Image (spheres, rainbow, N blue to C red):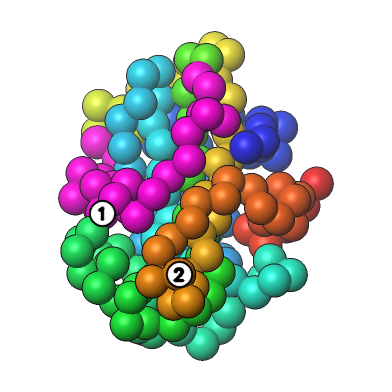
Amino acid sequence: MDSLTGRVSLKGRLGDVAQRLRSKLDGKGYDKVLYFGVEGGFAMATELERFAADGSPVAEKRFSTGKIGGWLGAFDYFKRLVWGEDGRFRVFVFVVTNRAFTPASYAATETDLGRWRSTGSLILPPRVSTTPVPSGTTVTLLVYEFQADKGREGRLVAENERLPFAIHAKSLGFAS
């Protein structure tokens, strides 16, 4: 977890901030995001992505083109993981809010990925999008890393920020 405040303009409306983040993600090949309501703003999550040990995205089978990846239901996700391939995966979650929160105590699981898929929205609701950016708003990036290892019966192991945050931020174009 780290703040991107100062690296993302907070001028205008919340929809403007979402568009700035989305433009940055689009430029890095993240075609799909899901939006979630949070108190005082919104959250935006990327789809599950395969990445290399150096933090760079793996071009082949990066998202849902391989046996694992993309937004799937929890059962499909686990089934593909068990019969799928080993690898390192991550989800980026941007939280834009003027409210304090403590995500460090929470590690996402494969169940969460399925729940996010079923509860997220493909668009930012107009009532949120048109809201002026509240005073004190910050942009926080959460990085959830997973290791798929068939030797461990295909279980995902959530290891929040296993790589240094700066490496993940750099892969998104938010160099420190």
Local secondary structure at mark 1: helix
Q: Is residue 138 magenta?
A: no
Number of other residues with Cα within 10 Å of mark 2, as a class: few under 14, some 14 to 19, many 20 or more: few
Number of other residues with Cα within 10 Å of mark 1, as a class: few under 14, some 14 to 19, many 20 or more: some
Q: Tell me, for residue 153, which label it has, or none.
A: none
Indicate the position of residue 26 as horizontal and vertical percent values: 49, 63
- Report the residue at 23% width, 59% height from top: 74
State whether residue 112 is above or below residue 28: above
Indicate the position of residue 45 as horizontal and vertical percent values: 41, 49
Indicate the position of residue 55 as horizontal and vertical percent values: 68, 66
Return the disc, 2 or 1, that comes first in the chain's sequence.
Answer: 1
Q: CA distance from mark 2 to mark 1?
A: 20 Å
- Is residue 14 at all visible to an observer of this figure? yes
24 to the left or right of 119: right
Nearer to me, 25 or 11: 25
**On the image, numbered disc 2 is attached to which residue?**
152
Q: Is residue 117 magenta?
A: yes
Residue flagged by tag 2: what amino acid is it?
A: Arg
- Is residue 19 at all visible to an observer of this figure? no
State whether residue 30 is above or below residue 93: below
- Report the residue at 65% width, 74% height from top: 52
Q: Which residues are magenta?
A: 101-125
Most distant residue in the bottom direction? 60
Q: Quadrant of residue 61?
A: bottom left
Residue flagged by tag 1: what amino acid is it?
A: Gly
**On the image, numbered disc 1 is attached to which residue?**
114
